[in-house]
Image (spheres, rainbow, N blue to C red):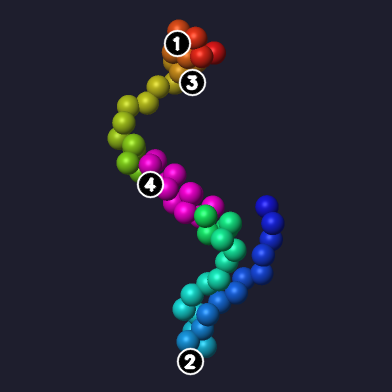
Amino acid sequence: MQKFKEQYIVNEKGKKTAAILPIEKYEELLEDLHDIAIVAERRDEPTITFGELKEKLRKDGLL
């Protein structure tokens, strides 16, 4: 991951009001936010074990 220097927009009192970041970093953050939203939406769905998943994939010919 590439490091970048933080840049801020400040108001007349010197208080930070916004941040400037590379578009690639912004897009990464949006993708992460989307992933977190999906996890939250699926929180109450039933789960299966890793072994059950492997067995299902084998039966479906995907493993």
What residue is shown with label 3?
A: 50
Q: Which of the two marks, 3 or 4, is nearer to us in this view? A: 4
* Label 1–label 2 contact, CB within 8 A: no
Secondary structure beneath label 1 = loop
Q: Quadrant of residue 43?
A: top left
Q: How many C-alpha atoms fall within 10 Å of the one at disc 2: few (<14), some, or many (≥20)? A: few
Q: Quadrant of the C terminus?
A: top right
Q: Kindly identify which residue carries mark 4.
A: 37
Residue designated by label 2: 12
Q: Please tell me in which quadrant of the rendered image residue 21 appears.
A: bottom right
The amino acid type, in three-letter code, at marker 1 is Asp
Cβ–Cβ below 8 Å for labels 4 and 1?
A: no
N-term mark: 2 or 3: 2
Other-residue count near label 3 (Cα within 10 Å), few / some / many at <14 / 14–19 / ≥20: few
The magenta-colored residue range is: 28-39
Instruction: Check disc 3 and report its element: helix, strand or loop.
Output: helix
The residue sitting at 35% across, 43% down in the picture is 40
What residue would you read off at disc 1?
A: 60
Give the image location of residue 52, x and y in percent.
44, 15
